[in-house]
Amino acid sequence: MKVTFGGSPVELAGTEIHVGDTIADFTAVKNDLSQFKLSSIKGRKLIVAVPSLDTSVCDAEVRKFNVEATKMPDVTVIVVSMDLPFAQARWCGAAGVDRVLTVSDYKDRNFAHTFGAYLPNVGLIARSVFLLDSNNTVKYVEYVPEVTHHPNYEAALAAVRA
């Protein structure tokens, strides 16, 4: 799949995800450096992938989903980035973000490859949003066409409410 990054076309690495696919599992690193596994989260999951929390669009996006998480008690919002776990914890503390779970894919890029969202030329994750039901079947997918732009919040939230 191709997206643009700063206007330049880039090819995503990994397996492109489609509605109806089932995700077996993925691993990442929690802010305390322990291992995170998707399989440890029960129920519905909204996975928000961002290049870096330290950019204005990612900052605004995660803050928005943090607020929306208060309206989705049956959904766990998981934010994945390549930021180091220490940086994620610092950013969340400074931003007052406490309703989403941030995990880092810096170590082995397992999420990025599993979800087809890896930007190999820059070593980041493409901005994307995935909704999984309690069986990890994909109900919504958005690979944002231009990585530096916001996702379609209304569509993602409508999928959560459906």
Image: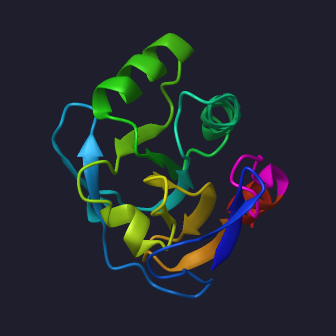
The image shows residue 138 at horizontal and vertical percentages of 55, 77
Q: Nearer the viewer, residue 117 or 67?
A: 117
Q: Of 110 and 41, which appears nearest the observer?
A: 110
Residue 42 at x, y percent in the picture: 36, 61
The colour mode here is rainbow
Q: Measuring 44% from the left and 75% from the top, which residue is drawn there?
A: 136
Q: How far from the left and from the top, in percent, is residue 55?
A: 61, 30
Q: Residue at x 28, y 53 (%)?
A: 28
Q: Quadrant of the C terminus?
A: bottom right
What residue range appears in magenta? 143-154
> Magenta part mainly helix, strand or loop?
loop
The quarter of the rendered structure image containing the N terminus is: bottom right
Q: Residue at x 34, y 51 (%)?
A: 105
- On screen, residue 96 versus residue 105, left or right, reads right
Measuring 36% from the left and 43% from the top, which residue is drawn there?
103
Q: In the image, is residue 146 part of the stretch drawn in magenta?
A: yes
> Vertically, is 127 above or below 71?
below
Q: Is residue 129 above or below residue 87?
A: below
